[in-house]
Amino acid sequence: MNEKLEFDTVDQTIAKLVPNQVFEQLQTNEEGLTTEEATKRLDLYGKNTIKEKQGKSLYPLFLANFTSMLAILLWVSGAIAFIAQMPQLGIAVWCVNLINGIFSFIQEYRAGKATEALKSLISSYARVIRDGQEQQILAEELVPGDLILIEEGEKISADARLVMSSDLRVNQSALTGESHPVQKYADAVEGKDLESFEIPNLIFAGSTVSSGSGQAVVVKTGMNTEFGKIADLTLNVSEELSPLQKELVRLTKQISIIAFAFGLTFFLLAIFFVKNPMAESFIFALGMIVAFIPEGLSPTVTLALAQGVQRMAKKNALVKNLSSVETLGCTTVICTDKTGTLTQNEMTVNHIWLPGRELKVTGSGFAPKGKILDNGREISAANDSALNLLVTAASLCSNAKVIPPNQENPHYTVLGDPTEACLGVVAEKAGVHVDFLQRELPRIYELHFDSRRKRMTTIHELNTQVHGKTRVAFTKGAPKELIDLCETVNVNGAVSPLTAEFKATVMAANDQYARLGLRVLAVAVRYIGEDDQDLPADVSEYTVENIERKMTFIGLVVMADPPRPEVPDAVAKCHQAGIRIVMITGDYGLTAESIAKQIGIVRGDSPRVISGVELENLSDEELRKLLKEEIIFARVAPEQKYRVVENLQKVGEVVAVTGDGVNDAPALKKADIGVAMGISGTDVAKEAADMILTDDNFASIVQAVEQGRAVYNNIRKFLLYILNSNMPEAVPSAFFLFSRGTIPLPLTIMQILFIDLGTDLIPALGLGSEEPESGIMRKPPRNLAEPLLNKRIIFKAFCWYGILASVISMCGYFFVNFSHGYSAAGWAEKGSNVYLVATTMTLAGIVFSQIGAVMNCRTERQSVFKKGLWKNPIINIGIAAEILFLALIMYVPLLQDVFGTAPIGTKNWLLLFCVPPIILMIEEIRKAVSRRLTHHD
């Protein structure tokens, strides 16, 4: 092999060849490659390994927490404080930035293990034939042309073409997301309209052999495998800023502009109006800039997001990145798979069709709890011979086993095919114990399932003769193929000839179930004797041709993977919240459409169902047009799921994606918020995702969205709260300037810092922990174009709460002056005790105004009394802390010197305690008027 194969086309070409041609195409034979040839090919193709993306060093990850726009703003403001000869302020601001950066790093740090998880799914060793001998080699040494041996329980290490198989079934769930084992065989197939994973003579790296054995010739290795393509997609997805991160960058710019605009204004006023010296005016202006930068905003945002993470964890959603919390809140589209997320991933028999009647089966999942109902009347196998024969035949013609809950696993689990497992469950519901049946009717031979004939047969020894026969053959399979083998039909225990009309009736019932997206198996029986002339005496000589004929049709078994009971309500909530749901599944279109209609994802009669093959032929522009409609994607490949997500993002959607398999990893990475399954999810999916559902439940996503919206609303609430104090912090300086210095500065820079970091911080954190307001999921997702700091917030902070607090705080300053005999003719001099008491009263007036404001900020329009005035314990603690801290800086001498404060009298304290109720009631009146006006509109 001197030249590499064209890997992109080899699937289609190699599938069409018979085994001898496969050997010829890949320049090998039944004795495998020689060691010399294998070495040459290893040099040509490289090792069979998954490439790793160069991980980021810890140092850049750590430093990134100190170089965001908001962090840079705080570094600059600290530096300005030093220039303005306020080193205490500079040190305090920088300490806040350091603590916040370290906290963020601890919260968000996670190792990049996605490729390690991918590599763990590839077997470390492989069995091959080389130089005519079976050998065990490292999987990384496999090369195209190697002849590999596989059997039950082994992982497949490379993409290969089968040349021999024996009842081979392969679990491709890690690659396709569908848990049903797939039948594989070595015969040539056309494969023209099939996805790679659907081609029955190809096996793939990362999948596992469920049963049987086989030999295959390696076609692709390493990054050229389907597995490698998924890894490549995952590794090459670039990290992008979340909506909140982008918003915080914009907010930082806005705050910077506001702060520097105020600083420049005060600088010019100090020079030209007050006639202060330039140096003094510059230092004063720098102090104002620092005062207008909310130093507490960054830690408050970080801690609020961390609280959101904790609340989501209680609702079965583990969030790995802090900013992902809010991203959920602005999600506009959820792309979800079907199996295990919307459904229970537990195949369940829900109907039994017997000639002349239809039985309903209750209960869901693999627990043998439920009833068999005939027109609402409970029946069992003990009193219904037709039902007894059907469940006996179906449960014995099966290789699956249901394991009940135990100490290691609290759930029912399945060994084998879930489709077969549910047959044993329905037998138990009918009162037939499968273990007892297997002892009473021991299996002596099996004609394995074949995807070409679409059925399997088991032969059992009878403990008592039936019609003089000592053995019985039970067959189950596709209705069309099975009914053609039948000559008679069992009708309530009586055997009658099978007519063409009856065949049509059976197929009509089958078609009706299929249209509902249900899976249907037909069951038939044949009693055989050792002396039957048309059968060989030796059981080992039984074949499909001599056993699967002259059969008696028994009935149909109808099954489905039922939706989770809580999902329809969750889907309805999504619709109500303006969130679209797009199902992207590896299952068949009819099944996907049926489930989508049952749970309300699609509400029209004819949603568009696009298969992977159809999607391949659509241009991006055509796809984007279709994405505006009700649409379902079925039988899609990993790169196609990635493409759907990418095109949704290109039209401005914020996309959440669910997934559990390796095949989902690229789309999970690409999504704005990737959601992996915690129970059924692979390590690869969990590492690629931003959030993990511990219960694998779609309803948990909706609860997380609600919490995400609450987080954003809460960020707005504490942004409003933090900015409230900026106006009363600036107004005292305005009095100082416009009085040309005759009014001594009523509030110092250190007192402003005390408000921003000492008293505002804990109540702001309390606002960050507020539960979602009622009706939050009845609103559409937020408009990403609308800034976090919008006109309404600015107006409310500066022109409403700001003016109220300014009036109250300045009244406190003048009240102290007036009560000590000072007036406009001459105010208390700077440094005097009365001046210290007056500035303390200004500070206290702002703090007590903020106490009223924090209560008001808890709701936008709803009365805070309706929500519960004291129901937020963190805010309650914050209010107590504010008063305590204020008292400490008033009465502790050391702190008095630092903050320029003095004790205030009892009368002043009484006046201060009147402030919060006044602020609260004024805002309650405004909210009531607003609600009434909206109601009238």
Image (tube, grey):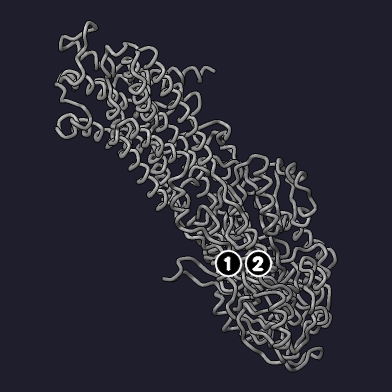
x, y percent for residue 131: 71, 91
State whether residue 528 is above or below residue 252. below
Residue nearer the viewer, 900 or 662? 900
Which residue is disc 1 drawn over?
118
Residue 667 on image: x %, y %: 62, 54
Is 876 displayed left or right of 318 in the figure?
left
Looking at the image, is 134 positioned above or below residue 94? below
Badge 2 crowding class, 10 Å Cα cut-off, few under 14, some 14 to 19, many 20 or more, is many
Query: Crowding at label 1, few (<14), some or many (≥20) Cα neighbours within 10 Å?
Result: many
The image quadrant where one finds the C terminus is top right
Residue identified by numbered label 2 = 227
Instruction: Report the residue at 77% width, 44% height from top.
Output: 622
Marks 2 and 1: CB-CB under 8 Å?
A: yes
Quarter holding the N terminus is bottom right
Residue 375 vs residue 404: left or right?
A: right
Residue kind at label 2, given as amino acid type: Phe
Q: Position of residue 478 (x, y in %)?
A: 75, 68
Q: Kindly identify the amino acid type of the residue bearing the numbered disc 1.
A: Leu
Quadrant in the picture for residue 481: bottom right
Image position of 926 with respect to 100: above or below: above
Query: Compared with residue 814, is residue 225 higher up or lower down, i.e. above or below?
Result: below
Asked if residue 8 lies left or right of residue 864, the reply is right
Callout 1: SS? helix
Q: Secondary structure at mark 2?
A: helix
Residue 440 in sight = yes
Q: CA distance from mark 2 to mark 1?
A: 9 Å
